Image (tube, coloured by chain):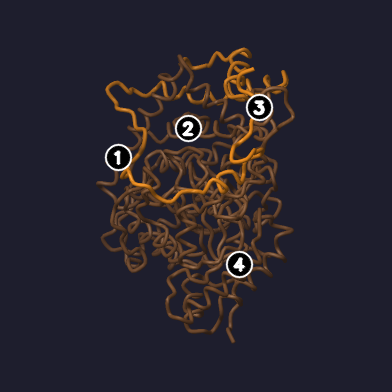
Amino acid sequence: MSDSMDLSIDDVKQISVLTRISMTEDELNVMRTQMKNILDSVTILNEVDTEDVEPTGHSVNVKSVMRDDKRGDSLTQDEALLNAPQTEGSFVRIKAVLE
Amino acid sequence: MYPLDLTKITISEARTLLDRGEVSSVELAKEYIDRIRNLEKSIDAFVTVTEDQALLDAGQADKRIHDGTQSNLTGIPMQLKDNICYSGIPTTCSSKMLENFVPPFDATVSRTLKNENAILLGKGNLDEFAMGSSTENSALKSTKNPWNIDRVPGGSSGGPAAAVAASECMFSLGSDTGGSIRQPAALCGVVGMKPTYGLVSRFGLVAFASSLDQIGPLTKTVEDSALVLQSIAGHDSRDSTSLDVKIPDYVSNLGTDLRGFRIGVPKEYFIDGIDLEIKKSVLKAIDVLEGLGAEVKDVSLPHTKYALAVYYIIAPSEASANLSRYDGVKYGFSERDAETMWEGLENTRSKGFGPEVKRRIMLGAYALSAGYYDAFYLKAQKVRTLIRQEFEEVFETVDVLAMPTSPTTAFRIGDKMDDPLQMYLNDIFTIPANIAGIPSISVPAGLVGGLPVGLQFMAGALQEPNLFRAAYAFEQSTDWHKQTPPL
């Protein structure tokens, strides 16, 4: 990354498509300015020599945790569907994925 | 009859009164419900008040106390930040996206507190999805600082901090991703504590940035903070990052003698831009600690200046992944009025999220996107390693670090809303602890212009006893924790 981020309106538009957050042209312009300011401020990290430094994903040593393959308590089907905006029988209903 | 205003007492004082039968849990709950009724219209610390359930639960607590089967928090009135699930009670995250979400399960901390028969008075307001430093990003209401209702309470746990400061509950649980417990605690003049990452289960805490999020207590005193942590700390198989460690006795460790105790003062936390009166208060606090026998020395953490940049890459990146689950299908807000599934998804997310949440999702998605991943996310994770190592080295020479919690006191509502970058600077002194995963606490250490100042301590991973020792010794030698807002 260079010291000033080259963030075009098309870049922001593309991100809005990827994140499924639609925006008006005005909103895109405001977002571009704000994102650019924030991204410019993080270029300070360029100063830091990170050659041969391992990345930290978690601050504690996280090992992969596997549970025993035993049946345990979980939500009932009714409980799991309780908050669904639209259901049909014991299913969540959505619009067709493939037209 | 009891001689006290019951809303002004601490958990340990209430425990004594409850166990002696001098006051019942129902009486205690009623006092708090009355106070909430009187104050909420000016403070707005609660998203939901669970009055009826609280009185029922208090009756149960009284039975347990009568039977002699009570524990530390039985019958104690509390609040939970509204991103912590409590079965059957709405968990909104102060977002339109979850405004009507009623979790069918308990967070592990909620389950623990239920098992103790602590009394839930309601859920605390926050910046939407815990993203913010003033609680102004709440889509539901803006919480006011009890010390001055024209000012913000800090954030994102602004509801919890304001509720404890206004004596609307005896304690609250918040979440801290970059300072969201400690900064509002400082601005509202209460004790706010972020435990070591992994010490308290995150199961049932609505995820924001999973490698940084941690639940912790907001209380009136350090002893109460230790008491609450004692209950909620511990291994949980439902959180894969939960630490399987022995939990020490936090409360019996408290004392006021600091002889042989080493306190480091990092110069990077006393930079230009910090309110001079805050600097003065914190330096005075450090003198108090020295007077108690502590050995105070100057230390340096040169990578501190990169912590904010690391945070504003890592937190949005993780948020963009975590918040992709809000699709209007399984739960939450759903905009059904659309031609296609994709259009419905887009409408749901565009109308369900507020501006700050959108900003962070988009920023994170950009930082993680092809071509930028190495430059942003990987780079930030590497600098994170250097920050963590620097803390590890400094804790070989000192027991705790002492510094200000926030560079300013509570600012005016509306003052920083137009400039996200200015808002982010509020967390400049709290973020490093999240980056390194270490525990940290903020305690009241003064008043400037009638507004509270926070003194912050940080300790090495799992060194909570050191943190409480320093904080308790300071608190007991000063009267700042006894000051109450003019309500």
Q: Residue furthest bottom?
A: B1
Q: CA distance from mark 2 to mark 4?
A: 36 Å
Q: Which residue is mark 1?
A: A61
**Amino acid type at image mark 3:** Lys
- For mark 2, does the 10 Å Cα neighbourhood hold few (<14), some (14 to 19), or many (20 or more) residues? many
What residue is disc 4 on?
B54
Contact, mark 2 vs mark 4 (Cβ under 8 Å) = no
| Secondary structure state at the residue bearing disc 2 | helix
Say whether mark 1 and mark 4 are on the same chain: no
- Is B322 located above or below residue B120 in the figure? above
Camera-nearest label, 4 or 1: 4
Q: Residues within 10 Å of mark 4 (few under 14, many from 20)?
A: many
Q: Which chain is orange?
A: A
What subunit carries mark 1? A
User: Looking at the rendered structure, which numbered label has been put on residue B370?
Assistant: none
Q: Which comes before the other along the chain, label 3 or label 1?
A: 1
Q: Are marks 2 and 3 on the same chain?
A: no
Q: Are marks 1 and 2 on the same chain?
A: no
